[in-house]
Image: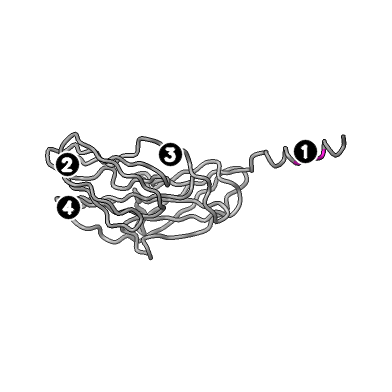
Amino acid sequence: MRALRSALGVLALAASPAAAGDLVVQVRTAGGAGVANAVVTLYPGGRPSPPGVVRSDYQIAQRDLQFSPFVLVVPIGAQVSFPNFDDVRHHVYSFSPVRRFELRLYAREQTRSVRFDRAGIVPLGCNIHDNMIAFIDVVDTGFATRTDNGGRASFTAIPGGPVLVRVWHPWLRAPANQLELRVAVPDHGAVAQAVPVNLRPPPRPVRSY
């Protein structure tokens, strides 16, 4: 009986959730301005976490001769739709080795979709309108999000301990447009991490950040 109680105690410890904390990453330019549309991904212990639930509503729309949103974050396995809300036809494509595809000319209120099964950055363009540029970041961790207009990315319930943080932005001056740093997340409570970045001027005429 004592051995059984001991075994049950070990099982209970194994099943109990690990202590977790919160993390806010603040991405700013050297001048202190918040950087929107930066993708922040976390790797607790330096390893990918289990991905979140793959939703069915991922979308990059074509509206006013622009892609919207400019940056989309999706998990591996996501299906992304590309609806056209313009009065002209669009021809969406990507030459990325992560997911090469071509959606030939289609008109207003028509849509196409593409599935993304590998992690990485997928730049998008329109073969008809060179000013249309967007990016899909296919992530291999459940802790990933875009910064808001103030440059903030907030995470909750992060396993306590060392966390690898990656910050990506299409105009970031860094190898592969990405920075890496390590942050210690407390077992309980919250921590804020400022990430100063230098950005290249965006191509014109393209929305910047």
* Closer mark to the observer between disc 2 and disc 4: 2
* Closer mark to the observer between disc 3 and disc 2: 2
Which tag, 3 or 1, sits closer to the chain's start? 1
Disc 1 designates what residue?
A: 9
Which tag, 4 or 3, sits closer to the chain's start? 3
Disc 4 designates what residue?
A: 127
Q: What amino acid is at disc 2? A: Tyr
- Please indicate, yes or no, whether residue 91 appears anywhere in the rendered image: yes
In this rendering, position of residue 17 left or right of residue 195? right
Label 4 crowding class (10 Å Cα cut-off): few <14, some 14-19, many 20+? some
User: Eyeballing the image, is 182 above or below 138?
Assistant: below
Disc 3 designates what residue?
A: 54
- Residue 148, picture quadrant: top left
Look at 43% across and 39% down and name the residue there.
54
Q: How far apart are labels 3 and 2 at the CA level? A: 27 Å
Q: Position of residue 62 (x, y in %)?
A: 21, 41
Which tag, 3 or 2, sits closer to the chain's start? 3
Quarter of the figure with the N terminus:
top right
Q: How far apart are labels 1 and 4 at the CA level? A: 62 Å
Look at 52% across and 51% down and name the residue there.
48
* Closer mark to the observer between disc 1 and disc 2: 2
Instruction: Determine if the magenta segment contains residue 7.
Output: yes
